[in-house]
Amino acid sequence: MKSITEVSNLENKRVLLRLDLNVPIKNQEIQDETRILKILPIINFLIKKKAKIIIISHVGRPKGKIQKELSLMPICKNLGSKLNRDIELISKNIYELKKNDLFTSIDEEILFLENIRFYSEEEKNDDNFSKQLASLADLYVNDAFSCSHRAHASVCKITEFLPSYSGLQLDTEIQALKKVTSEIKKPITCIIGGSKISTKIGIIKNLIPKFDNIIIVGGMANNILEYNGHSIGKSIKEDNCKDVIDEIFKTSKKFNCSIFYPEDVVVGKNLTDTPRIKSLNEIENNDLILDIGPKTIEKIILIIESSKTLLWNGPAGYFENVNFANGSFEIAKKIVEKNKNNSIYSVAGGGDTIAVLNQIDALDKFNFVSTAGGAFLEYLEGKDLPGITALN
Ligand code: 3PG
Ligand code: MG
């Protein structure tokens, strides 16, 4: 893998820069800027080298359709104000763009392409689409470690058509995760939560041999509760997970890894309802499980207390409403407390986990924070990430 820092002359070179600016947005407002802050170094580096930058990113999962509420406009504006520049967001169809039509004025340094997932070709890792993207630039930089587990056109296929390099943030993340995975002190615990059940549930089984404890919270925990015969009301869940969960429990016995999941929950009738603590057999048909309950928090705190290394991806509940953020906050606070007296090595990853940590000012109190969620977990699995393999 070659780093962009190894390229000697970038003056006037057009750089297609893949970033992960998939930040949480609510009513057109950015809820957490961390992913934007983390990529300022690569942009400043390229500006200093007098390169011309074409930013590619996605936000959300528009599935190949233009969705106004998933426009990158708020992110483009935010980045522009951080860099003290007017950055143009190009909404014109990518197939209609021509290299010579871009950067027509000499002082123009940065362009921003509209949400790349508005094109179905992106997720299909499409050849022609990648070629068209490549035709706009002289070289490609991936500074989106957090998307590198996706075999998508702007992460993967594109590297076949342009000289391709890793960016500064991607290099930092890989170095840090390499260090984490090679210097582990046991007992080691992994906390997995969040709402992307389909991305993560298959990963757990592969993590089991590497961990002493796996704590499952968030959306995936609902699947486990249902598997154990509890009603989960109208809570989020993934269909057809029985076999995966069977395997999780079987594998955990084989490798002597304790799997822990909620023993009580906090529910609401909707996302803005007042929170109610319930035991597992009190959950009603129209309840939504939105956080872990106090007994569960207490148990998790004990497990953290006994751990020497801790990796965390995915909030314990619907933290977007502070009434359901308590579980995530308590987990974070316990880790921070242990970190203070150096009795744990802690790593957190993922856009939403970062948002949780920022809300209680805990981001810099972990040993390392990765911007990546899914990619972070797949890296821990020991899997080759398509975006990284492509750079190699
Ligand atoms: C993330 O937020 O983890 C990345 O932006 C990837 O998003 P995805 O899970 O929708 O592919
Ligand atoms: Mg995310």
Image (tube, helix red, strand yellow):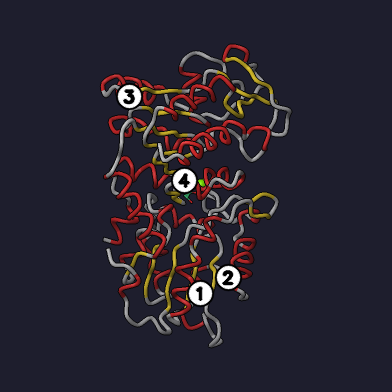
Badges 3 and 2: C-beta atoms under 8 Å apart?
A: no
Q: Nearer the viewer, mark 4 or mark 3?
A: 4
Cα separation, mark 3 vs mark 2, equals: 50 Å
Q: Dot 2, how many residues are within 10 Å of its Cα: few (below 14), some (14-19), or many (20+)?
A: some
* Among numbered discs 4 and 3, the one appearing first in the sequence: 3
Determine which residue is flagged by label 1: 97
- Three-letter code, disc 1: Leu
- Residue at mark 4: 366
Q: Residue at x 59, y 23 (%)?
A: 293
Q: Residues within 10 Å of mark 1 (few under 14, many from 20)?
A: some
Q: In the displayed structure, does residue 104 sit left or right of residue 16?
A: right
**Label 3 or label 2, whichever comes before in sequence order:** 2
Task: Return the mark for residue 90.
Answer: 2
Q: Amino acid at mark 3?
A: Cys
- Amino acid identity at mark 4: Phe
Q: Nearer the viewer, residue 178 or 110?
A: 178
Where's the N terminus, which quadrant?
A: bottom left
- Expressed as whole percent of the image width and height from the top left, the position of residue 328 reads 56, 35
Closer to viewer: mark 3 or mark 2: 3
Based on the displayed image, in which of its 4 quarters is residue 50 positioned? Answer: bottom left
Disc 1 secondary structure class:
loop
Q: At 32% across and 50% down in the image, what residue appears?
A: 385
CA separation in Å, label 1 and label 3: 53 Å
Gap in angstroms between the C-alphas marked 4 and 3: 24 Å
Residue 143 in the image, given as x and y percentages of width and height: 41, 62
Distance of mark 2 from mark 1, alpha carbons? 9 Å
- The residue at which mark 3 appears reads as 257
Q: Position of residue 110 (x, y in %)?
A: 53, 75
| Residue 66 makes an appearance in the image | yes
